[in-house]
Amino acid sequence: MTHAPLTITPALLSTTDESPASASAPTEDIERAEYARAELRGESKELAHLTRNFKMDLNVRADREAIREFIEPRLPAAEERHRQASGSPTDDARWAKIIADMRRPDADVLSLSMAAQELLTALQEAWRPGPNVQDIANRIRASITTGTYPPGSYLSAGRLNTELGCEPALLVRVQRALTDLEGEGLITIPQQNRVRVAGETEQLDQVSQTTDWIRLLIQNGVYPPRTIIPTRRDLARLLVTPTTVLTQAMRVLHEEKTVIAYTGTPTRVCAELPFEAAEPPDLSTLLARLDAVALPDADLSPDNISAMRQQARNWWHKRFTPHPEALTHTFRSLAATTAYLIPLADQQYPDDQRVRTLLRTAAITALAELPKDFDRRVWRAACLGAAVVEILELVPDFVWRGKA
C-alpha cells in the first residue's frame, strides 16, 4: 500500500461521527476525514486490481493469503468502529459480521474478496462527518416521546434525514437507526421507506370531520340561511374529500336541520338554524385578520406556492405526518397567498356572490382555530391549498409577488 492506514482515535471519532451535521465539525477534522476516505477509495481500487487475475473458482491458498495480507492493516480500524457502534444493535451487528466474514478460516477467495471490499466501503462511510446511528436514533426517539411524531403518524427515512440536517449520503445511518427503533417497538416498517410510529391512535372519522367543518362555515356566515351550498363535486375538490363522505355529512346536517338535502335537488341551508350564525363577513375585515396568521415576507412566487399547496395535499392523501414546524410554515405561507389573492379576485369579480363565497371560505379556512388533532390540522392545510387553487383559476393573469 502507498500509505500507512490513518490512525483512528476515540477523540477523532467523536468529532466526525457524533457532530449534528458535517457543517458543524471542525475544518481540520473534515479535511482529515476527506483524506481518509480518499485513501480508502484508493485501496478499494488496489484491491480490485490485485484480485482481477485471481481464479475465483480454483480457490488458490496464495490468493486467499494475499487478500488477508492486504486487508490486515485495516482490521484494527474496523474493530475500533465496532466498539464505537456498541450503542446501536443494528450497527454493532453489521460491524461484527463485516469483521467475522474477513476472519473466517474457511472462506474461499471470492468470499474473502467481497468481504474485503465491504470492509473498505464500510470504513469509507464511517468517515463521513455527521451524527452516528445511536445519535440519530436518540433524536428520533426524543421526537416520538415528546409527541412531535405522534402515535400512528407516518414518516420516511428521507424526510427524517433532511430534518436532522444530514447530507443525503447519511441516509443509510437513518435507516439503521430506524431498524433499532423498530426493535424497541417504537415504530413499525410495514412497507419500504414508509415508517409508522407505534401506539394506538384515534381513527380519524372523516364524516364527522367534514360535517363539523361545513357546520363551522355556516356558523361563520360563509353559507347564510336559505343559500345553496356548492355541489358535492365542487365541495369534494374544495375540501379534499370523497363525494361519498360528503353525502354522509350532508345526511347528518339534514337530520339536525342545518341543511335541506334531497337527492336530485341542490342542497340549501335551512332558514332557521339550530345554532347562532354570523352574518356574511366583510372581506376587508377578514383580510385585516389574515395579517396575523400569514407568514411575513412569504415567498409568493408561482413555483413556491405550487410546491406548498402540492405538499399539503400530498401530506393528507399519503397520510404522512409532517414535522410541526414544516406544517406551520406551509399553512402560514398558504395563508399569506390567500391574503394576497383575495383583493385581486374581488376586484375582478366585484358582484359575483359565488366568488365572494369562495373567498370567504378561503379566509375562514386560514383563520379558524386549528384543531388539536394533528391529522385534522394536516387536512385543514390541504383544504387551504385547494382554496388557493380555486382562487388562482379566477385570477390567472396577475403579477406574482416574489419574496421580499
Image: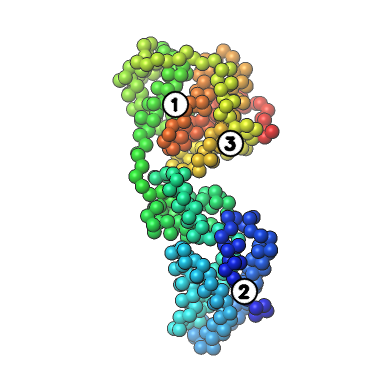
* N-term mark: 1 or 2: 2
Q: Nearer the viewer, mark 3 or mark 2?
A: 2
Q: Which label was assigned to residue 306?
A: 3
In the image, residue 323 above or below residue 281: below
- The residue type indicated by label 1 comes to Leu
Residue shown at 62%/72% (left/top)? 40
Image quadrant occupied by the N terminus: bottom right
Mark 3–mark 2 Cα distance, whole angstroms, equals 50 Å
Q: Which label was assigned to residue 7?
A: 2
Q: Nearer the viewer, residue 376 or 133?
A: 133
Locate residue 64, reporting x and y percent.
52, 84
Mark 3–mark 1 Cα distance, whole angstroms, equals 21 Å
Mark 1–mark 2 Cα distance, whole angstroms, equals 66 Å
* N-term mark: 3 or 1: 1
Quadrant of the rendered image containing residue 7: bottom right
Q: Which residue is mark 1?
A: 235
Residue found at the very far front of the displayed protein: 11
Does dot 1 land on a helix, a strand or a loop? helix
